[in-house]
Amino acid sequence: LEQLSKYYNQRSSKQHDDAGSRSNALEDHHVIHAAVQARITVENLQQLLSDYPTNSCCKRDFFNFGVLPLHIAVTPHNDASAGEENDQDVARVKCILSAYPLGAKHLDLRGRLPLHHALLQRAEAEVIMLLIKTNPISLSLPFVPTKLETSDDVRSMTGFLPFHLSCCLDLSISVIFELIQSNPCCISIN
C-alpha cells in the first residue's frame, strides 16, 4: 500500500500535457488493479477512478489472465474480522461498477465473468446480487473455462450455470436462494 501511495503521489504531482494520451494510459493502467488488490478505502478508490477514468476498463496482461479491477474486487476479504471489511468489499464493487458497468460482462482469459470469480471465491451475497443486477444475462451463461484453466475441480464444472456452481461449491443458502429467485428456470428439468 505504501508503494501504491508513493507511486500515486508521484504521478499526481507530475504535470500531464495530455492526461488521456496513450503513453499515460499504458504507464498508469495497473494503478487501479493494484489499488483494488491492496484494498484501499472506497474514498481513495473513488479518487483514483476519478483521476484515471479509463483504467477501470483496462485489462491486466496475459500473465494475470486479462482481469479487470472488478474481477479482483469481487474476491472477498479472507480476514477473520469480516464484518466491516465485507462492507468495504461491497462498497468497492459498487464503486467500480458505477465507473464501468460493462465490466460485469467481461470475460477474462480463462473464460470467467466477474460473477464466476465471485462464486468461485465465495463472495458475499450482496456482491453477487450487484453483479447479477448489472448483468442479468450472466445467470444463463454457462461456465466455460478455456484451456488455460488448469484446476481439475474447476474444469469439472464446465457448462454449469451460476446456480449450479453455487451448489457445487456449497455456498450459503442466501446466495443459492438469490440465484434461484433471479433465474427460476435454472432449476427446471429438461
Image (tube, helix red, strand yellow):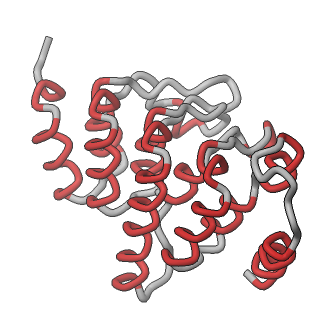
Q: Please, is residue 125 above or below residue 180 in the view?
A: below
- Compared across the picture, whether 25 is left or right of 89 comes to right
Residue 44 found in image quarter = bottom right
- Compared across the picture, whether 166 is left or right of 4 comes to left
Q: Nearer the viewer, residue 107 or 35?
A: 35
Q: Residue at x 87, y 66 (%)?
A: 15
Which residue sits furthest front? 17
- Where is residue 102 drawn, in percent x and y? 46, 37
Q: Residue at x 75, y 55 (%)?
A: 30
Q: Nearer the viewer, residue 99 or 134?
A: 99
Q: Which of the image's four quarters has the C terminus?
A: top left
- Where is residue 165 drawn, in percent x and y? 35, 39
- Compared across the picture, whether 59 is left or right of 155 comes to right
- Where is residue 75 drawn, in percent x and y? 50, 60
Which residue sits furthest top? 190
- Compared across the picture, whether 25 is left or right of 182 comes to right
Q: Residue at x 59, y 77 (%)?
A: 40
Q: Please, is residue 4 above or below residue 100 in the view?
A: below
Q: Residue at x 52, y 68 (%)?
A: 46
- Where is residue 50 drawn, in percent x and y? 58, 62
